Image (cartoon, helix red, strand yellow):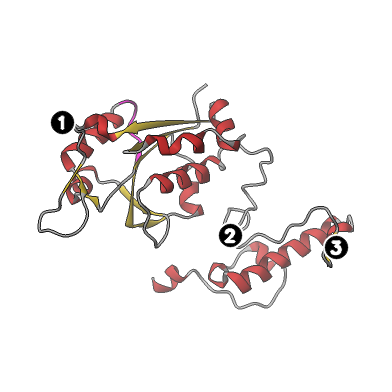
Amino acid sequence: MLPAIRFDVLTLFPNAFTGFLSESVLKGAIVTQKIEVNLHNMRDWADDKHATMDDRPFGGGPGMLLKVDRVVPCVEAIQRQQEPGRLLMFTPQGCRFNQPFAESLSTEKRIVMLCGRYEGFDERITEILKPEEVSIGDYILNGGEVAAMAVIETVMRLIPGVLGDEDSNRFDSFSTGNRILDCAHYTRPREYRGLAVPEVLLSGNHAEIDRWRKENSLQRTQVKRPDLLVTSASVSSLKTETTIFVDSKKQQE
């Protein structure tokens, strides 16, 4: 059986993924061959005895840059192993990774991810390979490995059969069935330190429970992430008179 998606991760530190790939749902997805994850040590494409992958930037300045004559042959060789995959490069200036982006990746057969380190990449790497530059947030990591893990885990959850309940990924925050925040959830005990579970959730009235969850989802989003509110069938069905804000990026457009 062929996996739904093959992930190829190009990194200087493949051992960083050892624990990540051997736990929980991700391990199960690999064992059942729903996904395939291949780690490639970019140092294997260095041709000197020290396996040098970086050098000082021309013009001076702090940090070291990954060398174009090491990274480009590495990526080209990995792409030749199979039909070329969608190539992602993790950089601060990249397109923001979010749930719709993950959904677009979940339809791919192969995703190749290039993890940077140090001060970044020689610009010619981008010019030659023309990857999709991707950022998981406005902060700086030591390298792209954590970003690659975030992509693998987010996309993996969208593959049929990976999660025990197929509705889990449809109604999560930001997802196709609920682009706003998810509602609050409760489990036993019914009361703890004076805080009780909302009575409606104990009523057995599924129509009222569904309504409460939709209303709570909307209320939480209004308070915590009003930028997420968009016109949708789920919101309009509540018949709530609410000012709907579009995504800030759409406002700028």
Closest to the observer: 3 or 153?
Answer: 153
**Of the residues tagged 3 and 2, which is closer to the observer?**
3
Q: Is 8 situated left or right of 76 in this image?
A: right
Contact check, label 3 and label 2, Cβ < 8 Å: no
Mark 3–mark 2 Cα distance, whole angstroms, equals: 24 Å
Q: Amino acid at mark 3?
A: Val
Residue 181 rendering spot, x and y as whole percentages: 62, 62
Q: Which residue is mark 1?
A: 48
> What label does residue 219 carry, if any?
none
Q: Which sits earlier in the primary sequence, circle 3 or circle 2?
A: 2
Q: Are marks 2 and 1 in contact (CB under 8 Å)?
A: no
Residue interval drawn in magenta: 81-86
Observer-nearest of 179 and 155: 155
Specify whether 76 is left or right of 169: left
State which quadrant residue 253 falls in. bottom left
Q: Which residue is mark 3?
A: 200
Q: Position of residue 46 (x, y in %)?
A: 20, 32
Residue located at (47% from left, 41% from top): 152
Measure how far apart labels 3 and 1 are at the Cα level: 68 Å
The quadrant holding residue 17 is top left
Badge 2: few (under 14), some or many (20 or more) residues near its Cα, within 10 Å?
some
Q: Hey, what amino acid is under mark 1?
A: Asp
Give residue 125's position: percent from left, percent from top.
21, 45
Q: Does residue 200 sit above or below 101 in this rendering? A: below
Magenta stretch containing residue 127, yes or no? no
- Say which amino acid is labelled 2: Arg
Using a 10 Å C-alpha cutoff, classify the residue at mark 1 as few (fewer than 14 neighbours), some (14 to 19) or many (20 or more). Answer: few
Q: Residue at x 87, y 57 (%)?
A: 202
Q: Disc 1 on helix, strand or loop? A: loop
Q: Residue furthest front?
A: 50
Q: What residue is shown with label 2?
A: 179
